[in-house]
Image: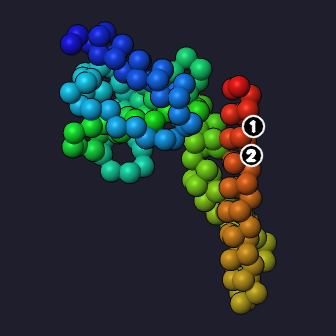
Amino acid sequence: MSGSEGLRAWLEIAAVVTSSLPPHVDVCVPRDAVPHPREAGLRRTLGLGRGRHYSLPLPDGGRLHVRDRGGDCYLAHWDVRDPHRDPLGHLILDSPDITATISGGASAIAEFLREGASSLASLSSLGSALLGGLLLGLLLSNAAFHLIMSLRG
C-alpha cells in the first residue's frame, strides 16, 4: 500500500469513527487492514497511556488519535480539538482531568500563598482550595464539551 493509499485508509477510518461514535471512544483497528500510522503519514505525538501515539488532523479542527500498543490492532478515537492546532481547546474539551488538575493546583497555590504556610488552618485551606479547584475545572470543562457537541449538530 502506497503512502497516499495508506493515508486514505486512515482518513476513511476517521470518517467512520467521527460519524458513528462520540469522541474519546476507542475502536480496535486490525493491523492487517491498514498500514502503520507512521508509514501513512500520521504525526508522532504525545499521549497518555502506554504505547506510541499518532495524530491525524481533521478538517473540522479535531484529530484522529491512534495508539500503537502492540498486539493485533491499533486503538483509535477522535478528539474534538487537535492539540497541535488548539492546545487550550484540547485541554478543555478532550482532557478535562488535566484541566481540573491544573485549575485545582493553581487555586490551591493561590489560596496557600494568600493564607500563608504557617498554620494548620492554611493547610486546611490548601486542601479545600485544591478540591474546589478540581471540581470547578471538571464542571467547566464538562460544560464546554457539551456546548461544543451541541453546536456540532
Q: Nearer the viewer, residue 29 or 131?
A: 29
Image coordinates of residue 131 in percent, x first then y, are: 69, 70
One can see residue 84 in this view = no
Note whether 40 is above or below 111 in the view shown: above
Residue lying furthest right: 114
For the point 71% across and 40% down, the residue is 146
Q: Is residue 13 visible?
A: yes
Q: Residue at x 76, y 87 (%)?
A: 121
Q: Residues within 10 Å of mark 1 (few under 14, many from 20)?
A: few
Per the image, the residue denoted by label 2 is 143
Instruction: Identify the image quadrant of the C terminus.
Output: top right
Amino acid carrying mark 2 in the image: Ala
Whole-Å distance between the Cαs marked 2 and 1?
A: 6 Å
Residues at discs 2 and 1 in contact (Cβ within 8 Å): yes
Amino acid type at mark 1:
Leu
Q: Is residue 126 above or below residue 59?
A: below
Residue at the spot of label 1: 147
| Quadrant including the N terminus | top left
